[in-house]
Image (tube, grey):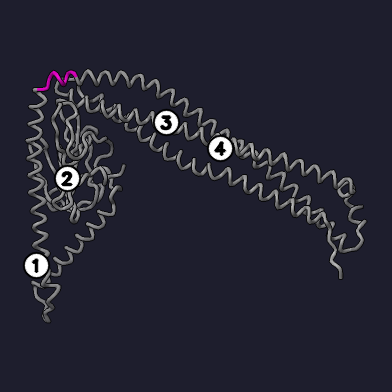
Amino acid sequence: MRRSSDPRNATARTHHTIIRWRYVFAVLLLALPLLTFAQSKKELEDKRKKLIRDIEMTGKMLKKTTQTKESTYDRYIALQNQIERRENLIETLGNEIAAAERNIEKNDGVIASLNRDIEKMQTEYGRTIRSAYRRKTLSNPLLYILSAESLNQAFRRWLFLRKYDEFRRKQADAIAFTKEMLAKKVASLEDTRREKENLLISMRSQKTMLTVEMVNKNDLLKTLAQDETRLKSDLQKKQAAHEALNQAIERIIQEEVRKRVEESRRTKPATTVRPSTPTASTGNSAAESAAAMEEDNTSRSFSSRRGQLPWPVEDGFISRSFGRQKHPTLKNIEITNNGIDIRTDESAAVRAVFEGRVAGVQFIPGHDYTVIIQHGNYYTVYSNLGETSVAKGDMVKSRQQIGRVSNNTITGTSELHFELWNQKERVNPAGWIRK
């Protein structure tokens, strides 16, 4: 039996395929840049929010710093941090605006492309409708079906008309939906750009205030230059106190490392000799071996948390970084910091950054109480504590409060000194705590 074919079916199928692929391509063209923009936008917004919080916190701490001769240096450091964060915030807002404008431009191109496709589809649709009317296909669908040469052809014509109508309805809905979606996306991006532009205008006005703060900072610097003798004397006292702190920390850590080495040596015979009758000594060796294994697991667990450890205080900013560096105000003088100094709130709670055992608690003049916590091969050091709530040998959990930061009654500042050691080696803590 000869298979009946209708050219209208082939035309409809071809037309349907072209439209479908145009629609898919347009949606992909729209979605890909928006997905990239959404990720970038989220990162920039998170950075902006954090900078705003830091600026608010620094400003609050700056207000608490007394405006006395003794606090001039602390005010200078706080102002310096405030200026850096405000400049970073302005730069971040500029990046957000630039990213929004780039994506608006991309989506304008997508919309123009889709509009051209829609016009072309409408032209093709009109041509198909006119052709159908000339052939009496749509003007009288029933007559078109009844004029078939066979029952099979009539059925195929009916099926064609049904699919044709369904396709056209879906096509119209898809076009309308796409245009509506694009319009909303563009409107949203335009709103975002206006919002960021308003924020940038606001930040420019803040930059004017920032200029005033920079003038104040320069004035403080001049005052500090005139008081260089006192600053050098204070620096010598701080360095002496810091050296006492270093010696105390090294002494405690070296003692802990020595104990671990001795325990490790004692446990070696237990792993090579297996007496038939258990003794008290073998029981102790097994316990020591288990303890050593647990410490190794703690070391690995601590190491895996690099960059994700919580801050030792709830709020604060790093006022002095790790390592050897130029003095902020004294020329030709370098200072060494074995950890980082974190300016924080008055009497802020100090928390352990990871679970471990308290290896030592000691009072050191110039640094008040110092707590050292062992985490396997790693040690964290918390200095400048006005009070402590732990004792040597205590087991602590991550984020557990171990004391409170001491307050400088003369300058009105509260600063935690935080160090990280890997056995006898000092490590920069800034790379280990969460940004």
Report the mark closest to the observer, 2 or 4.
Answer: 4
Are the two marked residues, 2 and 4, in contact with CB atoms closer than 8 angstroms? no
Label 3: state its secondary structure: helix
Identify the mark at residue 106; answer none if there is no mark.
Answer: 4
Boundaries of the magenta span: 222-228
Using the numbered discs, state the Cα–Cα distance from disc 2 to disc 4 in whole angstroms. Answer: 52 Å
Mark before the other along the chain sequence, 3 or 1: 3
Mark before the other along the chain sequence, 3 or 2: 3
Answer above or below: position of 361 versus 368.
below
Q: Is residue 95 left or right of residue 124?
A: left
Report the mark closest to the observer, 3 or 2.
Answer: 3
Using the numbered discs, state the Cα–Cα distance from disc 3 to disc 4 in whole angstroms. Answer: 20 Å
Q: Residue at x 16, y 21 (%)?
A: 224
Task: Please provide percent x and percent y for residue 302.
Answer: 25, 54
* Residue type at the position of mark 1: Arg
Task: Please provide percent x and percent y for residue 404.
Answer: 19, 39
Q: Residue at x 31, y 42 (%)?
A: 435
* Residue type at the position of mark 4: Lys
Identify the residue position indicated by label 1 in the image: 266
Which SS does the magenta portion mostly show?
helix
Q: Is residue 224 magenta?
A: yes
Identify the residue position indicated by label 2 in the image: 381
Q: Is residue 396 magenta?
A: no
Instruction: Tell me if mark 1 has few (under 14), some (14-19) or many (20+) residues whose alpha carbon lies within 10 angstroms of its own.
Output: some
Label 1: state its secondary structure: helix
Report the mark closest to the observer, 3 or 1.
Answer: 3
Mark before the other along the chain sequence, 3 or 4: 3
